[in-house]
Image (cartoon, rainbow, N blue to C red):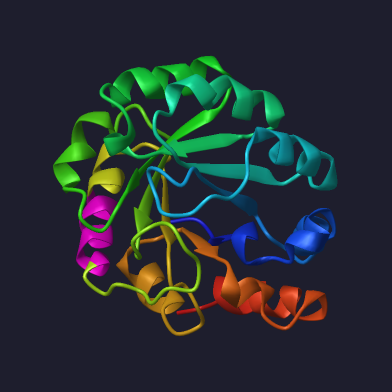
């Protein structure tokens, strides 16, 4: 695996200073900016839409890693791509035809990711692994930040890592949920190469962001 990438989740940032927060974590060494989009329907929370992504885009040249926890997904792909998303990740449960959704994401000029909830069978991933650029393993049930890491996801991460390596393709294996200085080493050991970290990144305010990101990246 190449180096570990850190994707701060802006869900844990100060929403009153969102542009400044995105600039601060970008300057502090973030690799991706992770944007959690929730609709209050697919998951029990409502966050932001494409207009906010568009407003944030000038504040960072980092990869915008947009995680759509919405259903349906397809009608909103072009809006998020046009707003500046680089990667668009969706859940297979959010639509009847996930392969078509992947095609639509790529046609819009973005990389495509597939997200697996803790209870999503890995069988939902295997037929699509050859078409996607990122696998996002949720190590909490999606909807809210600050939850505890679900340890049962570690064997799933290991299994996915082996399949990615066997494929020979460059597919990010991202883990999101309960990632902190204690759980990051376990996720990395299992095979994760991108860590989504909200609370652990933004804890302590802007002067702490660089240290937080470096600590997460170096976790072993």
Q: Residue at x 61, y 29 (%)?
A: 80
Most common SS among magenta residues: helix
- Left or right: where 110 falls relative to 15: left
Q: Is residue 94 magenta?
A: no
Q: Which residues are magenta?
A: 153-162
Quarter of the image where the N terminus is located: bottom left
Q: Quadrant of residue 85?
A: top right
Compared to residue 125, the image places residue 144 above or below, namely: below
Residue 93 at what x, y percent from top left? Answer: 27, 37
Q: Residue at x 82, y 53 (%)?
A: 19
Q: Is residue 155 magenta?
A: yes
Q: Nearer the viewer, residue 81 or 186?
A: 81
Q: Nearer the viewer, residue 129 or 165?
A: 129
Residue 182 at what x, y percent from top left? Answer: 44, 85
- Left or right: where 128 falls relative to 108: left
Compared to residue 112, the image places residue 27 above or below, namely: below
Q: How many marks?
A: 0
Quarter of the image where the C terminus is located: bottom left
């Amino acid at each position: 695996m190449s180096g570990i990438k850190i994707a701060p989740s802006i869900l844990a940032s100060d929403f009153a200073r969102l542009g400044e927060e995105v600039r601060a974590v970008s300057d502090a060494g973030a690799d991706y900016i992770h944007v959690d989009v929730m609709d209050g329907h697919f998951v029990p929370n409502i966050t932001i839409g494409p207009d906010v992504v568009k407003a944030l885009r000038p504040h960072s040249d980092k990869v915008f890693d947009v995680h759509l926890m919405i259903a349906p997904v397809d009608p909103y792909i072009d809006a998020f791509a046009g707003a500046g998303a680089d990667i668009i990740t969706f859940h297979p449960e959010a639509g009847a035809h996930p392969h078509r959704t992947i095609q639509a994401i790529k046609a819009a000029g973005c990389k495509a990711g597939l997200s697996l909830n803790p209870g999503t069978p890995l069988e939902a991933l295997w037929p699509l692994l050859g078409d996607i650029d990122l696998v996002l393993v949720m190590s909490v049930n999606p909807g809210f930040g600050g939850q505890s890491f679900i340890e049962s996801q570690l064997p799933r991460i290991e299994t996915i890592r082996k399949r990615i390596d066997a494929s020979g393709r460059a597919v990010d294996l991202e883990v999101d949920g309960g990632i902190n200085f204690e759980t990051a080493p376990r996720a990395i050991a299992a095979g994760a190469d991108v860590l989504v970290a909200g609370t652990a990144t933004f804890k302590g305010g802007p002067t702490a962001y660089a240290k937080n990101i470096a600590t997460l990246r170096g976790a072993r």
